[in-house]
Amino acid sequence: MGNAVNAVTISVPDPAAMQELGRTLATVLRPGDLVLLSGELGAGKTTLTRGLGEGLGVRGAVTSPTFVIARVHPSLVGGPALVHVDAYRLSGGLDEMEDLDLDVSLPESVVVVEWGEGKVEELSETRLEVRIDRALGGEAGHDDHLLSLSEDLDPEIPDDRKVTLHGLGARWADVDLGALAVARA
Ligand SMILES: Nc1ncnc2c1ncn2[C@@H]1O[C@H](COP(=O)(O)OP(=O)(O)OP(=O)(O)O)[C@@H](O)[C@H]1O
Ligand SMILES: [Mg+2]
């Protein structure tokens, strides 16, 4: 434990499974957690967040925040609100994020950020990074490891995703991320 890298990669065959992974992930999230989602356009970041919102029991369906940078989903069950941020058009990083003047306390919420790499890491050095990669196909963004993994996959399943969860900092040191993969099976 301690400073050990806490990471797991989970195979997600379809959108329903991605949503289910989000519901399962919600069970380990606490107020103040920052979840950073990365992956190309259409990777499944919003789909995962939709499941997170269901699992957390928040109000409103999670959708792509097309016209807003952030949307607040209050809890319906006395838990943390979900703050869903699309940082795609957030050029100014942390300062701009704080300027959004969200009517919510970030330390009391679960903050999920799409496209936040290089922009919002300062919000918390302790965070859960979630990377979603297409397991098949010729899209950019694959590393050699994932390409070699994809050779073993059923070619009948073209939309398989690899979700890598990577917990950084003391908050995540003792969280059994591997159990998330088991819970899905
Ligand atoms: N295994 C899978 N997991 C998740 N989504 C999948 C999978 N297979 C197919 N899909 C489809 O991929 C799309 C993912 O869209 P989504 O909006 O979640 O991606 P995104 O990463 O948020 O994109 P953007 O970068 O535009 O915000 C959906 O249309 C979904 O149905
Ligand atoms: Mg999205």
Image (tube, rainbow, N blue to C red):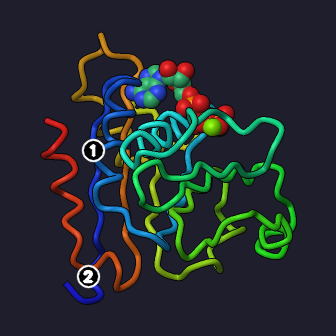
Residue 38, percent from left and from top: 56, 51
View extreme (top): residue = 156
Using the rendered view, name the quadrant where residue 97 is placed. bottom right
> Which amino acid type is shown beneath numbered disc 2?
Ala
Q: Which residue is mark 1?
A: 10
Residue 167, percent from left and from top: 37, 70
Position of 92 with respect to 7 (left or right) is right
Mark 1 Cα shell of 10 Å, populated few (<14), some (14-19), many (≥20): some
> Which amino acid type is shown beneath numbered disc 1?
Ile
Tell me the quadrant of the picture where the C terminus can be found.
Answer: top left
Tell me the quadrant of the picture where the N terminus can be found.
Answer: bottom left
Position of 177 with respect to 85 (left or right) is left
The one nearer the camera, 28 or 135, is 28
Mark 2 Cα shell of 10 Å, populated few (<14), some (14-19), many (≥20): few
Position of 36 with respect to 174 (left or right) is right
Residue in view at x 61 percent, y 71 percent: 106
Position of 76 with respect to 118 (left or right) is left
Q: Which residue is mark 2?
A: 4
